[in-house]
Amino acid sequence: MGTYCTCLALLLLLGTAKVHAQTTVFDFETDDQIAAWTIRAAAQDKLERSPQFATFGQSSMLFTTPAWKQGMGEWPAFEAKPPVADWRGYDRLMIDITNSGTERHFFSLFVSDSKLPFRDGLNYRFDLPAGGFKRFAIPLSFPEKVDRSDLSVMHFFTQRPEADMRLHLDNFALLKPGETLPDPPPAFVGQVANLSLAQVGSFDQLVSVCRENLLKLADTPELRRRADAQVAKLAAQVKAVRDAMGSTTLTLARLDELKAQLDRLPRNSARLESVFRLQKACAGVGLPTENALVGFATSMEKILPRDVPFTLTATKSVEVSLARNEKESFQVAVLPVEKDLKQVAVQVGDLKSADGKMFAAANIGCDVVGYVETKTRPPYNVSHVGWWPDPILDFLGPIDIAAGDLQTFWVRVRAPKGQAPGTYRGTLTVSAAGAKPMTFDLTVKVRTFTLPDCTPLPTAITFFEQKGQMGGEENWPTMKLKYADFLADYYIDYDSLYRSGPPDYEILQHLHDQGRLVAFNLGNVFNGGTDAEGFDKAIADTVERIRPAYERAKELGLLDHAYIYGFDERPKEQFGLLEKSAQALRKAFPEVLLMTTSYDDSFGLDSVVKTIDAWCPLTPKFDMAKAAKARAQGKAVWWYICCGPHTPYANWFVEYAAIESRLLMGAMPAKYQPDGFLYYLLTKWNQNKPVETGPFTDWNPVSWTVYHGDGSLFCSGPGGKPVPTIRLENYRDGQEDYAYACILEETIRLTEASLNERTKEQADWLEEATAALPVSDSLVKTMAEYSHDPQALYAWRNKVADLIDRSGMPNVDPWGKNFGVRGAAAMNR
């Protein structure tokens, strides 16, 4: 009986323990394992066995390449044929990498079979720590065309390293589901700890500099007391990390925690200086500093709640300028002083003009900014991994703010179409339980002109109906109209580039009746391209599939808004079939605009494709001179973004500056005059559940692959309701900026056309307006060179608005009732 119980206990233990097993691919214990690898530039780069940083056995493989300089190879790389060719049955490839340098590097891997180029295989990007170790578990998610039983190349590469690169690689192993690897030996942990200990000395200097900077700002006994306490805390953190790293019982997990503390110290030091700077600024303008500090920021900035420095304006008054039928926002930031704050809220009452007119408080929302947490570095450069401001939680009431957290509130002002122009004054109040409310003067200036109900720049943007995350299938007949109105409020049509069936005509009619419909897709055509074999039948079937949608749109009088999209990002090899498809579609649907993102940088000028109406390049590929030539032949040239481009080009990932969204939709199209904007998806939400709590939410910002926010521009909230983001707000604000430029341009045209003889005042206005219309290089110089300063954008926007107000033409409407998908082309641009 005792033997039986012992065996049973052993079986239970084995059932819950980790199964340490592996199929070794490379362990670098012999010279042959190094010789198996081919290096691209042997005169420049090296591969060698090293006794350091071995996680398995006694040796690692050391890859070194120097900092890139002009004339050197741009892609240092090395590759080998794995001795294990059949990877079926395995779900992960494990690779241990120690970066012994102090810089982060781009480093990536391709794995493919013997028949496909390595670039068509599995691709994985490593997030290498600086001066540290990481074990990478690479999911074996191969493209379907890769033969997993015949894997023949592992290709590692980097690009233009900015500093000398020294990587120790070891323990390449294949794992089956449930299998794990044992931890590296203690001697290895000590080697990695020494890398980090060598950096700790620099943090002593950081503490010294922080003390010096804080004492410069601390000009009262109370501030000096706080400065001394904060610096002592920083110094204690550095000492604790140093002591822990020297421990003989140090584990890798503990070392990772200590390195994370070190990584945060520079930002925490800079953040302390931000806090003291704000405290001094608040005191300088006579604001209370006992319980909370209150600062202001524009809508074009992202104020992070923790760990990083910030810039806020201390002021007793805020002014907002906007046109009728426009929304414009700013942010109020609240920082507790030493103790938590409870039940914090921002409120605004009614505003009044000098002549007694009212601007109702109902037109001003004061909403809590929510935060999403990034946990890894994406494939683009970011300044911070952690909490980022993104969703605007308009369902959340007064909130508690923990000491140390910086909480922002989104104040959105909406001027109704019927609001009388003028200047309105009132009060904004920040309140918290147990504290005296803080009040600020709020001025709202309403312009004489009115913005359109519809998007001023035609768009083709996919909205996938995630019904399960949007209130459920049973509620969809009601929710779909709420989503249609929500999107229209942000100048986005309810649409899809990839729809195979007909659009929802109830929604189209709903938007058209409101004057808010601009563009919709009748149906996608050969999104991934097509084959020559069987083409005639395929295109005939496609025409018949789209015909019912076309006939219905024609019956409803909506063809001015209809387009057909296809051949998504197809190469020149598909151009012949693209042209044949376009010819068939033109014959069947003569009024409908045909659009593609196929890769023709000439926009049809130098290719066989002559029948496409609208070309849509990625923003870096947009060429104004070529676009002008294409337009002279009756073509339109749009532009688009997706998971690219990356910095320095504008995009709207969660970590990118908020102003980039606004510039991308406003000043940039005003300068470069694309005919429309295309985006592939708004609701790449994966398994996210609706946001119901905050401000620190559980919404996962990972969207397409490992990007943050790509293809996901808003969230769902309680009951599936749509929840906007800072990025979406700036998208709409950019469109409104663009509308300003359109109105001024049309006002100039009407003025020139209507005046045979001009007064000096009119001539001066015309000269000034003509000079102000082009976006200056100080704001946007090129698509890759532009200002991140909100004041530069406000200067251009307000100048345009002032000129429209002075024109004496308050009702200029460049869009009219029938503004549709051909947009700017129909306006004789």
Image (tube, grey):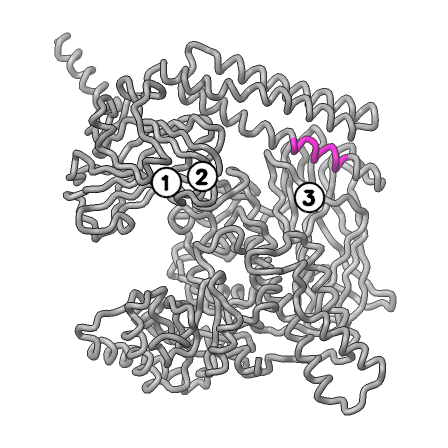
Q: Residue at x 41, y 15 (%)?
A: 190
Mark 3 to mark 2: distance in Å? 39 Å
Residue interval drawn in magenta: 270-279
Nearest to the observer: residue 599 or residue 182: 599
Mark 3 to mark 1: distance in Å? 46 Å
Q: Earlier along the polypeptide chain: callout 3 or callout 1?
A: 1
- Tell me where residue 565 appears, x and y as whole percent: 38, 72
- Tell me where residue 506 appears, x and y as whole percent: 44, 75
Mark 1 secondary-structure assignment: loop
Q: Residue at x 36, y 21 (%)?
A: 53
Is 705 above or below relative to 426? above
Nearest to the observer: residue 22 or residue 422: 22
Q: Please give the residue where the numbered disc 1 appears in the rendered image.
A: 76
Mark 2 secondary-structure assignment: loop
Q: Quadrant of the N terminus?
A: top left
Q: Residues within 10 Å of mark 2 (few under 14, many from 20)?
A: many
Q: Residue at x 42, y 32 (%)?
A: 165
Q: Residues within 10 Å of mark 1 (few under 14, many from 20)?
A: many
Dominant SS type (magenta): helix
Identify residue type, mark 2: Pro
Residue 538 horizontal side relative to residue 384, left or right: left
Q: Please give the residue where the numbered disc 2 appears in the rendered image.
A: 161
Identify residue type, mark 3: Ala
* Residue 250 visible to the viewer: yes
Residue 329 horizontal side relative to residue 510, left or right: right
Q: Quadrant of residue 729?
A: bottom right
Q: Residue at x 65, y 61 (%)?
A: 777
Q: Residues within 10 Å of mark 3 (few under 14, many from 20)?
A: many
